Image (cartoon, rainbow, N blue to C red):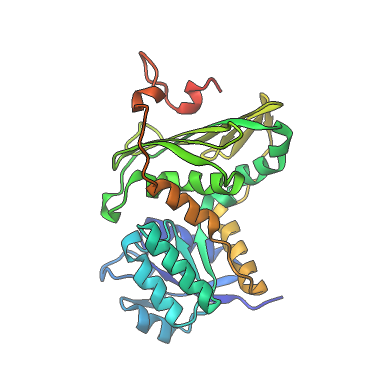
Amino acid sequence: MIDSVGVLLVGCGRMGRNHLKAIGNSSQFHCVGICDLNESFDGPQDLPRWQDLDQALLESQARAVVLAAPPDAHASLAETCLHHGLPVLLEKPLTPEFSRSLHLAQAFQGKGIPLFPAMVERCNPAWRLALTHWKSLGTVHRIVINRSGTSARPEHQTDVGHDLAIHDLDLLAQANPHLKPTLHEASPTRLQMRLQDHQGCTVHLEAEWDAASPQREWLVEGDRGRMRIDFQHRALVMNGQQIPVPKRDALESQLADFAATLTSRTQVDLGAALQAQAWLEAPIHATASISTFTSRGRRPTSMVERAGA
């Protein structure tokens, strides 16, 4: 049995506190302290606290870092961790711009230090179960995705695409890397995308902030069946039949995957995370309007509902 790895948590906002809870439930990690640039940050008083990352890394003797600071600080903070030779579990997006994310990924790869993308929906038990049933759908020809949140996060100086939709694009990049964006209409609070591949599979994605209720749903249709994945409630329906989903915490599963990477000393594949961001930032000359994706009369609560799931 390997020793528990001492991890420094950088950033103690909403996601940072979620990560701290997951670390507390892990047998593979323990938290050696918290670093946050905000002097008055709200965090547990029984852990060492720092504002300066260099000082925190030197004094805490951390062997790994969970970085959950706002996205615009990701690059500089991750580079500091790299300078200290420490592996990083980095919250999404890797950085606010694809070019900077690619540069950061190459820097870690060049040093042989793991940079692990915290794309937590990869570890959602509903998604992991869905992957085991994917081939039974036959050739997938249509995917409809809705992801919405009840509040915006302007303090992070990001948009809904990099905050919410990037999760779905990351999963799409793993499921079908041959997709190409053909429509992209966005504001800071609402995103509409369409992606297609050369075999005729079409993906419709909608993400928005300030919705009446949060939703995280996929409808996947193939020539031999259909699947509805409810990430929010961790439910899976195959051809109208509910499939039991294991009760597992996604953040804790993600930490276990991070630990496995450290143990195996293997390079982390950042291809899907980078592809997701490249899709978000690809210049698209749209030929259809947002109204293409909306219905007449009452607006349904999700694109999945509009698709008749």
User: Residue 65, can we see it?
Assistant: no
User: Residue 200, can we see it?
Assistant: yes
Q: Is residue 168 above or below residue 10?
A: above
Q: Looking at the image, which residue sits at the far right? A: 136
Q: What is the quadrant of the N terminus in the image?
A: bottom right
54 or 270: which is nearer to us?
270
- Where is residue 69 shown, x and y percent of the image? 36, 63
Side of 102 relative to 173 (left or right): left
Count of numbered badges drawn on the protein: 0
Side of 210 relative to 120 (left or right): left
4 or 127: which is nearer to us?
127
- Where is residue 181 shown, x and y percent of the image? 45, 40
Q: What is the quadrant of the C terminus in the image?
A: top right
Side of 145 relative to 27 (left or right): left
Q: Quadrant of residue 133?
A: top right
- Where is residue 45 shown, x and y percent of the image? 37, 71
- Who's the residue at 58% across and 31% down the image? 200
86 or 274: which is nearer to us?
274
- Who's the residue at 31% across and 76% down the image? 51
Q: Is residue 41 above or below residue 237?
A: below
- Where is residue 48 shown, x and y percent of the image? 39, 78
Q: Looking at the image, which residue sits at the far top? A: 297
191 or 230: which is nearer to us?
191
